[in-house]
Image (cartoon, rainbow, N blue to C red):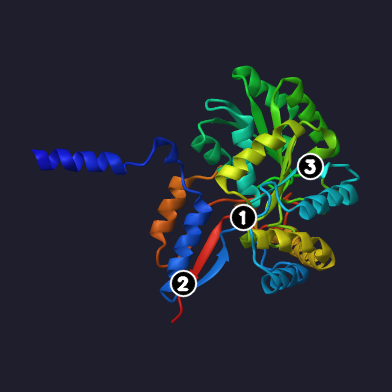
Amino acid sequence: MLESTLRDRATALLAPSARSDVPPFMVMDVMAAAARIEAAGGHVIHMEVGQPAASAPKVAIAAAHAALDAARIDYTSALGIPTLRTRIAKHYRDTYGCAVDPERIVITTGSSGGFILAFLSMFEPGDRVAVTVPGYPPYRHILTALGCEPVLIETSSATRHALTGEGLLAAHRKGPLKGVLVGSPANPTGTMMSREALTGLINAAEGAGIRFISDEIYHGLDYAFPAVTAAELSPQSLVINSFSKYFCMTGWRVGWMVVPEPLVRPIERLQQNLSISVPTLSQIAAEAAFEGREEMEAIKRGYQENRRILIEGLPKAGPTAAASFASPTRARPTRCVKRWRASRGGSVSTDRSSSSKSYVPKINRGAICVRQNHA
Protein backbone atom coordinates (compact mmCIF):
# COMPACT_ATOMS: atom_id res chain seq x y z
CA MET A 1 0.00 0.00 0.00
CA LEU A 2 2.76 2.42 1.01
CA GLU A 3 4.80 1.44 -2.04
CA SER A 4 1.82 2.10 -4.31
CA THR A 5 1.21 5.52 -2.73
CA LEU A 6 4.86 6.51 -3.13
CA ARG A 7 4.81 5.38 -6.77
CA ASP A 8 1.67 7.44 -7.43
CA ARG A 9 3.27 10.49 -5.85
CA ALA A 10 6.42 10.03 -7.92
CA THR A 11 4.33 9.73 -11.07
CA ALA A 12 2.49 12.96 -10.22
CA LEU A 13 5.79 14.77 -9.64
CA LEU A 14 7.05 13.72 -13.07
CA ALA A 15 3.86 14.50 -15.00
CA PRO A 16 4.32 17.20 -17.68
CA SER A 17 2.30 20.39 -17.48
CA ALA A 18 -0.90 20.72 -19.48
CA ARG A 19 0.52 23.72 -21.34
CA SER A 20 3.36 21.57 -22.68
CA ASP A 21 0.87 19.25 -24.39
CA VAL A 22 1.16 20.90 -27.79
CA PRO A 23 1.33 18.98 -31.06
CA PRO A 24 4.82 18.33 -32.40
CA PHE A 25 6.14 20.48 -35.21
CA MET A 26 5.91 17.64 -37.71
CA VAL A 27 8.77 18.96 -39.84
CA MET A 28 11.16 18.47 -36.93
CA ASP A 29 9.84 14.98 -36.17
CA VAL A 30 10.49 14.01 -39.79
CA MET A 31 13.93 15.60 -39.57
CA ALA A 32 14.68 13.50 -36.47
CA ALA A 33 13.44 10.36 -38.26
CA ALA A 34 15.71 11.17 -41.20
CA ALA A 35 18.67 11.59 -38.84
CA ARG A 36 18.01 8.13 -37.41
CA ILE A 37 17.94 6.66 -40.92
CA GLU A 38 21.25 8.37 -41.71
CA ALA A 39 22.80 7.21 -38.43
CA ALA A 40 21.89 3.66 -39.43
CA GLY A 41 23.71 4.08 -42.76
CA GLY A 42 20.75 5.05 -44.93
CA HIS A 43 20.76 7.75 -47.58
CA VAL A 44 18.22 10.57 -47.26
CA ILE A 45 17.15 13.27 -49.68
CA HIS A 46 16.09 16.15 -47.42
CA MET A 47 13.03 18.17 -48.42
CA GLU A 48 11.38 18.27 -45.03
CA VAL A 49 12.65 21.52 -43.57
CA GLY A 50 12.60 25.05 -44.98
CA GLN A 51 16.24 25.97 -45.14
CA PRO A 52 18.47 27.01 -48.04
CA ALA A 53 21.06 24.64 -49.44
CA ALA A 54 23.58 27.50 -49.55
CA SER A 55 25.65 28.64 -46.59
CA ALA A 56 25.74 32.04 -44.91
CA PRO A 57 27.33 34.94 -46.80
CA LYS A 58 31.12 34.64 -46.95
CA VAL A 59 31.50 38.02 -45.25
CA ALA A 60 29.36 36.81 -42.34
CA ILE A 61 31.50 33.72 -41.86
CA ALA A 62 34.68 35.81 -42.11
CA ALA A 63 33.35 38.23 -39.49
CA ALA A 64 32.62 35.32 -37.13
CA HIS A 65 36.14 33.94 -37.61
CA ALA A 66 37.66 37.36 -36.94
CA ALA A 67 35.59 37.77 -33.78
CA LEU A 68 36.68 34.39 -32.47
CA ASP A 69 40.32 35.20 -33.17
CA ALA A 70 40.22 38.70 -31.70
CA ALA A 71 38.52 38.54 -28.33
CA ARG A 72 36.16 36.92 -25.88
CA ILE A 73 32.55 36.47 -26.91
CA ASP A 74 30.63 38.17 -24.11
CA TYR A 75 27.00 38.96 -23.39
CA THR A 76 25.47 41.85 -25.30
CA SER A 77 22.65 44.20 -24.42
CA ALA A 78 19.35 42.32 -24.16
CA LEU A 79 18.05 44.36 -27.10
CA GLY A 80 21.07 43.49 -29.23
CA ILE A 81 24.37 44.97 -30.38
CA PRO A 82 23.69 48.68 -31.08
CA THR A 83 25.56 48.66 -34.41
CA LEU A 84 23.48 45.72 -35.64
CA ARG A 85 20.25 47.47 -34.67
CA THR A 86 21.44 50.58 -36.52
CA ARG A 87 22.36 48.51 -39.57
CA ILE A 88 18.89 46.95 -39.64
CA ALA A 89 17.36 50.43 -39.46
CA LYS A 90 19.47 51.35 -42.51
CA HIS A 91 18.15 48.24 -44.26
CA TYR A 92 14.59 49.53 -43.83
CA ARG A 93 15.57 52.91 -45.19
CA ASP A 94 17.45 51.47 -48.18
CA THR A 95 15.02 48.65 -49.04
CA TYR A 96 11.61 50.10 -48.22
CA GLY A 97 12.23 53.85 -48.00
CA CYS A 98 10.97 53.56 -44.44
CA ALA A 99 12.42 55.41 -41.45
CA VAL A 100 12.67 53.12 -38.41
CA ASP A 101 14.25 54.28 -35.16
CA PRO A 102 17.03 51.79 -34.18
CA GLU A 103 15.64 51.98 -30.64
CA ARG A 104 12.54 50.12 -31.88
CA ILE A 105 14.60 47.20 -33.19
CA VAL A 106 15.08 44.14 -30.98
CA ILE A 107 17.46 41.31 -31.88
CA THR A 108 15.96 37.85 -31.27
CA THR A 109 16.94 34.18 -31.38
CA GLY A 110 15.54 33.70 -34.87
CA SER A 111 11.95 34.52 -35.65
CA SER A 112 10.87 31.83 -33.16
CA GLY A 113 12.24 33.84 -30.25
CA GLY A 114 10.47 36.86 -31.71
CA PHE A 115 7.10 35.11 -31.62
CA ILE A 116 7.51 34.25 -27.94
CA LEU A 117 8.51 37.82 -27.01
CA ALA A 118 5.73 39.30 -29.13
CA PHE A 119 2.99 37.08 -27.71
CA LEU A 120 4.13 37.57 -24.11
CA SER A 121 4.29 41.34 -24.47
CA MET A 122 1.02 41.77 -26.37
CA PHE A 123 -1.43 39.19 -25.01
CA GLU A 124 -2.82 37.81 -21.77
CA PRO A 125 -3.73 34.16 -21.09
CA GLY A 126 -7.10 33.46 -22.67
CA ASP A 127 -6.74 36.11 -25.39
CA ARG A 128 -7.93 35.04 -28.82
CA VAL A 129 -5.39 35.55 -31.62
CA ALA A 130 -6.18 34.91 -35.28
CA VAL A 131 -3.91 32.96 -37.61
CA THR A 132 -4.64 31.70 -41.10
CA VAL A 133 -5.08 28.14 -42.35
CA PRO A 134 -3.09 26.89 -44.14
CA GLY A 135 -0.34 28.41 -42.05
CA TYR A 136 2.85 27.85 -40.09
CA PRO A 137 1.94 25.39 -37.27
CA PRO A 138 4.19 26.84 -34.52
CA TYR A 139 2.14 30.06 -34.59
CA ARG A 140 -0.78 28.27 -32.98
CA HIS A 141 1.35 25.89 -30.91
CA ILE A 142 3.30 28.72 -29.24
CA LEU A 143 0.09 30.65 -28.58
CA THR A 144 -1.43 27.55 -26.99
CA ALA A 145 1.62 26.94 -24.79
CA LEU A 146 1.41 30.54 -23.56
CA GLY A 147 -2.25 30.16 -22.64
CA CYS A 148 -3.74 32.05 -25.58
CA GLU A 149 -6.42 30.73 -27.90
CA PRO A 150 -5.40 30.52 -31.57
CA VAL A 151 -8.38 31.28 -33.83
CA LEU A 152 -7.96 29.57 -37.19
CA ILE A 153 -9.31 31.50 -40.17
CA GLU A 154 -9.61 29.38 -43.30
CA THR A 155 -8.41 31.03 -46.50
CA SER A 156 -9.18 29.96 -50.04
CA SER A 157 -8.07 30.41 -53.63
CA ALA A 158 -10.74 33.11 -53.99
CA THR A 159 -8.43 35.47 -52.06
CA ARG A 160 -5.20 33.73 -53.16
CA HIS A 161 -5.06 32.27 -49.63
CA ALA A 162 -4.55 35.73 -48.15
CA LEU A 163 -6.51 37.02 -45.18
CA THR A 164 -8.79 39.96 -45.94
CA GLY A 165 -10.10 42.66 -43.68
CA GLU A 166 -13.61 41.31 -44.21
CA GLY A 167 -12.53 37.80 -43.20
CA LEU A 168 -10.78 39.11 -40.09
CA LEU A 169 -13.76 41.18 -38.96
CA ALA A 170 -16.12 38.25 -39.56
CA ALA A 171 -14.06 36.16 -37.14
CA HIS A 172 -13.96 39.08 -34.71
CA ARG A 173 -17.75 39.29 -34.69
CA LYS A 174 -17.98 35.60 -33.70
CA GLY A 175 -15.72 36.24 -30.72
CA PRO A 176 -13.56 39.28 -29.92
CA LEU A 177 -9.98 38.99 -31.15
CA LYS A 178 -7.02 40.58 -29.40
CA GLY A 179 -4.56 40.05 -32.20
CA VAL A 180 -3.84 38.68 -35.66
CA LEU A 181 -0.62 37.29 -37.15
CA VAL A 182 -0.11 37.36 -40.90
CA GLY A 183 2.83 36.33 -43.06
CA SER A 184 3.58 37.84 -46.45
CA PRO A 185 5.06 36.00 -48.30
CA ALA A 186 3.07 33.34 -46.47
CA ASN A 187 4.09 29.88 -45.37
CA PRO A 188 3.19 27.43 -46.90
CA THR A 189 1.26 29.06 -49.74
CA GLY A 190 3.88 31.62 -50.76
CA THR A 191 1.16 34.21 -51.31
CA MET A 192 2.26 37.84 -51.13
CA MET A 193 -0.05 40.70 -50.22
CA SER A 194 0.01 43.86 -52.29
CA ARG A 195 0.45 47.22 -50.61
CA GLU A 196 -3.27 47.90 -51.01
CA ALA A 197 -4.28 44.52 -49.53
CA LEU A 198 -1.90 44.75 -46.57
CA THR A 199 -2.92 48.34 -45.84
CA GLY A 200 -6.59 47.37 -45.89
CA LEU A 201 -6.00 44.45 -43.53
CA ILE A 202 -3.98 46.53 -41.06
CA ASN A 203 -6.59 49.30 -41.11
CA ALA A 204 -9.39 46.79 -40.50
CA ALA A 205 -7.46 45.22 -37.60
CA GLU A 206 -6.50 48.45 -35.89
CA GLY A 207 -9.95 49.95 -36.45
CA ALA A 208 -11.39 47.03 -34.46
CA GLY A 209 -8.75 47.23 -31.74
CA ILE A 210 -6.95 44.08 -32.96
CA ARG A 211 -3.17 44.11 -32.59
CA PHE A 212 -1.30 43.31 -35.81
CA ILE A 213 1.81 41.11 -36.12
CA SER A 214 3.54 40.76 -39.47
CA ASP A 215 5.83 37.77 -40.12
CA GLU A 216 8.23 38.95 -42.82
CA ILE A 217 10.82 36.17 -42.71
CA TYR A 218 10.59 35.55 -46.46
CA HIS A 219 11.11 39.17 -47.45
CA GLY A 220 13.78 39.46 -50.12
CA LEU A 221 12.64 36.22 -51.76
CA ASP A 222 10.08 37.94 -53.97
CA TYR A 223 9.78 37.85 -57.74
CA ALA A 224 6.49 39.26 -59.04
CA PHE A 225 6.65 42.52 -57.07
CA PRO A 226 8.59 43.84 -54.05
CA ALA A 227 7.33 42.87 -50.62
CA VAL A 228 5.80 45.59 -48.47
CA THR A 229 6.68 45.88 -44.78
CA ALA A 230 4.03 46.58 -42.15
CA ALA A 231 6.60 48.82 -40.45
CA GLU A 232 6.02 51.32 -43.23
CA LEU A 233 2.23 51.18 -42.96
CA SER A 234 1.65 51.44 -39.22
CA PRO A 235 3.84 52.25 -36.21
CA GLN A 236 1.44 50.15 -34.11
CA SER A 237 2.25 46.97 -36.05
CA LEU A 238 4.88 44.57 -34.74
CA VAL A 239 7.19 43.11 -37.40
CA ILE A 240 9.15 39.86 -37.05
CA ASN A 241 11.98 38.94 -39.41
CA SER A 242 15.06 36.75 -39.47
CA PHE A 243 18.41 36.16 -41.14
CA SER A 244 17.46 32.52 -41.73
CA LYS A 245 15.94 32.58 -45.21
CA TYR A 246 17.27 35.34 -47.48
CA PHE A 247 20.67 35.36 -45.76
CA CYS A 248 20.85 31.53 -45.50
CA MET A 249 21.59 31.62 -41.75
CA THR A 250 19.08 29.14 -40.31
CA GLY A 251 21.38 27.52 -37.75
CA TRP A 252 22.79 30.82 -36.52
CA ARG A 253 19.45 31.50 -34.78
CA VAL A 254 19.35 35.26 -35.16
CA GLY A 255 16.45 37.49 -36.17
CA TRP A 256 14.87 40.79 -35.24
CA MET A 257 11.65 42.61 -34.48
CA VAL A 258 10.46 46.14 -35.17
CA VAL A 259 8.24 46.89 -32.20
CA PRO A 260 5.90 49.74 -31.26
CA GLU A 261 7.75 52.13 -28.95
CA PRO A 262 5.64 51.35 -25.83
CA LEU A 263 6.64 47.67 -26.07
CA VAL A 264 10.41 48.19 -26.24
CA ARG A 265 11.04 48.22 -22.50
CA PRO A 266 8.62 45.35 -21.69
CA ILE A 267 10.26 43.21 -24.37
CA GLU A 268 13.70 44.17 -23.09
CA ARG A 269 12.73 42.97 -19.60
CA LEU A 270 11.39 39.71 -21.01
CA GLN A 271 14.55 39.11 -23.05
CA GLN A 272 16.75 39.88 -20.03
CA ASN A 273 15.04 37.13 -18.05
CA LEU A 274 14.35 34.57 -20.75
CA SER A 275 17.67 34.50 -22.59
CA ILE A 276 19.83 37.42 -21.32
CA SER A 277 20.89 38.14 -24.89
CA VAL A 278 21.08 36.64 -28.37
CA PRO A 279 24.35 34.77 -29.08
CA THR A 280 27.01 37.40 -29.70
CA LEU A 281 28.79 35.56 -32.50
CA SER A 282 25.55 35.26 -34.45
CA GLN A 283 24.88 38.99 -34.05
CA ILE A 284 28.37 39.85 -35.34
CA ALA A 285 27.89 37.60 -38.37
CA ALA A 286 24.41 39.01 -38.99
CA GLU A 287 25.66 42.59 -39.14
CA ALA A 288 28.30 41.58 -41.69
CA ALA A 289 25.73 39.63 -43.73
CA PHE A 290 24.24 42.85 -45.07
CA GLU A 291 27.46 43.35 -47.01
CA GLY A 292 26.94 40.00 -48.74
CA ARG A 293 23.83 40.91 -50.66
CA GLU A 294 25.45 40.40 -54.08
CA GLU A 295 26.19 36.80 -53.12
CA MET A 296 22.65 36.33 -51.80
CA GLU A 297 21.10 37.81 -54.94
CA ALA A 298 22.98 35.23 -57.01
CA ILE A 299 21.47 32.48 -54.84
CA LYS A 300 18.05 34.07 -55.24
CA ARG A 301 18.42 33.93 -59.03
CA GLY A 302 18.97 30.19 -58.66
CA TYR A 303 15.72 29.94 -56.70
CA GLN A 304 13.98 31.85 -59.46
CA GLU A 305 15.20 29.38 -62.05
CA ASN A 306 14.02 26.46 -59.91
CA ARG A 307 10.65 28.16 -59.62
CA ARG A 308 10.43 28.57 -63.39
CA ILE A 309 11.21 24.88 -63.93
CA LEU A 310 8.47 23.86 -61.50
CA ILE A 311 5.84 26.22 -62.89
CA GLU A 312 6.54 25.10 -66.46
CA GLY A 313 7.16 21.43 -65.70
CA LEU A 314 4.48 20.45 -63.20
CA PRO A 315 1.52 20.95 -65.57
CA LYS A 316 3.28 18.73 -68.11
CA ALA A 317 3.73 16.03 -65.44
CA GLY A 318 -0.01 15.52 -65.28
CA PRO A 319 -2.79 16.43 -62.84
CA THR A 320 -1.78 14.00 -60.08
CA ALA A 321 1.79 15.26 -59.80
CA ALA A 322 0.77 18.89 -60.14
CA ALA A 323 -2.00 18.61 -57.57
CA SER A 324 0.38 17.15 -54.99
CA PHE A 325 2.32 20.42 -55.10
CA ALA A 326 -0.32 22.94 -56.05
CA SER A 327 -3.23 22.46 -53.64
CA PRO A 328 -2.78 24.16 -50.26
CA THR A 329 -4.30 21.93 -47.58
CA ARG A 330 -4.43 21.64 -43.85
CA ALA A 331 -1.61 19.62 -42.38
CA ARG A 332 -2.98 16.29 -41.17
CA PRO A 333 -0.48 15.10 -38.57
CA THR A 334 -2.35 11.87 -37.79
CA ARG A 335 -2.36 10.74 -41.40
CA CYS A 336 1.23 11.92 -41.75
CA VAL A 337 2.37 9.78 -38.85
CA LYS A 338 0.51 6.77 -40.22
CA ARG A 339 2.19 7.22 -43.60
CA TRP A 340 5.58 7.56 -41.95
CA ARG A 341 5.08 4.42 -39.86
CA ALA A 342 3.91 2.50 -42.92
CA SER A 343 6.97 3.53 -44.89
CA ARG A 344 9.84 2.80 -42.52
CA GLY A 345 11.59 0.92 -45.29
CA GLY A 346 10.76 3.36 -48.07
CA SER A 347 9.69 6.98 -48.31
CA VAL A 348 8.63 9.29 -45.52
CA SER A 349 6.07 12.00 -46.19
CA THR A 350 4.26 14.53 -44.02
CA ASP A 351 1.69 15.44 -46.67
CA ARG A 352 2.15 19.20 -46.59
CA SER A 353 2.05 21.17 -49.80
CA SER A 354 2.48 24.67 -51.15
CA SER A 355 0.77 26.82 -53.73
CA SER A 356 1.71 26.85 -57.39
CA LYS A 357 1.38 30.62 -57.14
CA SER A 358 4.20 30.70 -54.62
CA TYR A 359 6.69 33.51 -54.91
CA VAL A 360 8.92 31.68 -52.45
CA PRO A 361 10.95 28.91 -54.06
CA LYS A 362 10.18 26.13 -51.61
CA ILE A 363 9.30 22.72 -53.01
CA ASN A 364 6.43 20.99 -51.18
CA ARG A 365 7.61 22.68 -48.00
CA GLY A 366 7.95 20.40 -45.00
CA ALA A 367 6.86 17.58 -47.22
CA ILE A 368 9.15 14.79 -48.21
CA CYS A 369 12.09 12.89 -46.79
CA VAL A 370 12.97 9.97 -49.03
CA ARG A 371 15.04 6.98 -48.09
CA GLN A 372 16.74 5.33 -51.00
CA ASN A 373 17.32 1.60 -50.60
CA HIS A 374 20.52 0.49 -52.30
CA ALA A 375 21.07 -3.01 -53.60
Identity, as a three-letter code, of the amino acid under mark 2: Glu
Is label 1 in contact with label 2 (beta carbons under 8 Å)? Answer: no
Q: Is residue 317 above or below residue 121?
A: below
Q: Earlier in the sequence, mark 1 or mark 2?
A: 2
- Which amino acid type corresponds to the residue marked 1 in the rendered image? Arg
Task: Tell me the residue that label 3 is attached to.
Answer: 103
What is the crowding at mark 1: few (fewer than 14 residues within 10 Å), some, or many (at least 20)?
many
C-alpha span from label 3 to label 1:
35 Å
Locate residue 62, reporting x and y percent. 74, 72
Q: Which mark is residue 38?
A: 2
Residue under the point 58% across and 58% down:
49
Residue lying farthest bottom? 375
Residue placed under numbered mark 1 in the picture:
365
Real-space Cα distance between discs 2 and 3?
45 Å
State the residue at coordinates (39%, 38%): 17
Answer with mark 3 or mark 1, whichever residue precedes in sequence: 3
Q: Amino acid at mark 3?
A: Glu
Q: Tell me how far mark 1 sits from mark 2, CA to CA.
A: 21 Å
**For residue 213, which quarter of the picture?**
top right
Q: Does residue 135 appear in this view?
A: no
Between 41 and 321, the one nearer to me in the picture: 41
